[in-house]
Image: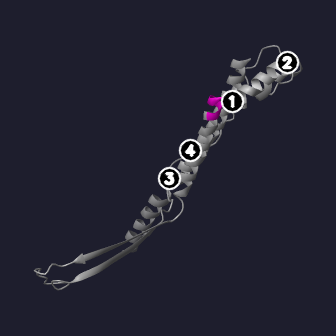
């Protein structure tokens, strides 16, 4: 009997803690992966000019008129505003996913006025010809324990969506400046 209960306990423990959703997300180290495949042959670090900040690459041309036109286009661009809204949307989705970790509490209430007719037959409840006030209230509380990491993975995916939206904003900004220039 002891071995059966011990076996059941071990199986239950293994099923509870052995079923994870997957490994933690790790950002790939692209510098290491791409190091050999995208380097120019025969160049050294001193041969490559200092990098220009890609967010403001047009300023390296030292043209005041171009800088003014690009700056105006960046402040008045609908595409850039849409990309910014996608960042806000991704952050909102993360908040929704993260809220699933919290306990929930629902409440409801109702009121109704009932009347039994003069000719009504009531075997249970109010006698005929009576008016009743009926009140009802209820509360439901719940909390999902994130035992297998479902909510944690959803939050991690939402974090990745935020990073993607931010990089998309930067790409739209650079592409818009390139189109204007």
- With respect to residue 131, does 100 lie above or below? above
Mark 4: which secondary structure? Answer: helix
**Where is residue 66 drawn, in percent x and y?**
80, 19
Mark 2: which secondary structure? Answer: loop
| Disc on res. 157 | 4
**Neighbours of disc 2 within 10 Å: few (<14), some (14-19), many (20+):** few
**Neighbours of disc 1 within 10 Å: few (<14), some (14-19), many (20+):** few
Spatial CA distance of label 3 from label 2 is 53 Å
Q: Nearer the viewer, residue 76 or 180?
A: 76
C-beta proximity under 8 Å, tags 4 and 1: no
Mark 1: which secondary structure? Answer: loop
Q: Along the polypeptide, which appears first: circle 3 or circle 2?
A: 2
Name the residue that disc number 1 marks.
76
Q: Is residue 2 left or right of residue 126?
A: right
Q: Is residue 38 left or right of residue 78?
A: right
| Disc on res. 150 | 3
Spatial CA distance of label 4 from label 1 is 32 Å
Q: Along the polypeptide, which appears first: circle 4 or circle 1?
A: 1
Spatial CA distance of label 2 from label 1 is 20 Å
| Disc on res. 15 | none
Part of the protein shown in magenta? 77-81
**Neighbours of disc 3 within 10 Å: few (<14), some (14-19), many (20+):** some
Which residue is found at the position 64% from the left and 37% from the top? Answer: 84
**Where is residue 180 drawn, in percent x and y?**
71, 19
Q: Determine if residue 64 is in view.
A: yes
Mark nearest the camera among 2 and 1 is 1
């Amino acid at each position: 009997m002891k071995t059966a209960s011990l076996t059941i306990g071990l199986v239950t423990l293994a099923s509870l803690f052995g079923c994870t959703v997957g490994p933690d997300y790790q950002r790939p180290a692209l510098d290491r992966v791409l190091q050999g495949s995208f380097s120019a042959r025969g160049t050294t670090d001193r041969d490559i000019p200092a990098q220009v900040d890609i967010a403001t690459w047009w300023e390296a041309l030292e043209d005041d008129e171009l800088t003014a036109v690009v700056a105006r286009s960046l402040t008045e661009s609908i595409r850039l505003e849409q990309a910014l809204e996608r960042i806000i949307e991704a952050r909102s989705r993360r908040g929704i996913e993260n809220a699933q970790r919290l306990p929930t509490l629902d409440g409801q209430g109702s009121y109704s006025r009932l009347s039994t007719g003069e000719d009504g037959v009531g075997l249970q409840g109010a006698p005929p010809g009576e008016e009743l006030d009926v009140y009802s209230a209820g509360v439901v509380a719940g909390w999902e324990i994130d035992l297998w990491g479902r909510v944690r993975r959803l939050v991690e995916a939402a974090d990745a969506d935020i990073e993607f939206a931010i990089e998309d904003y930067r790409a739209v900004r650079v592409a818009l400046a390139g189109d204007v220039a």
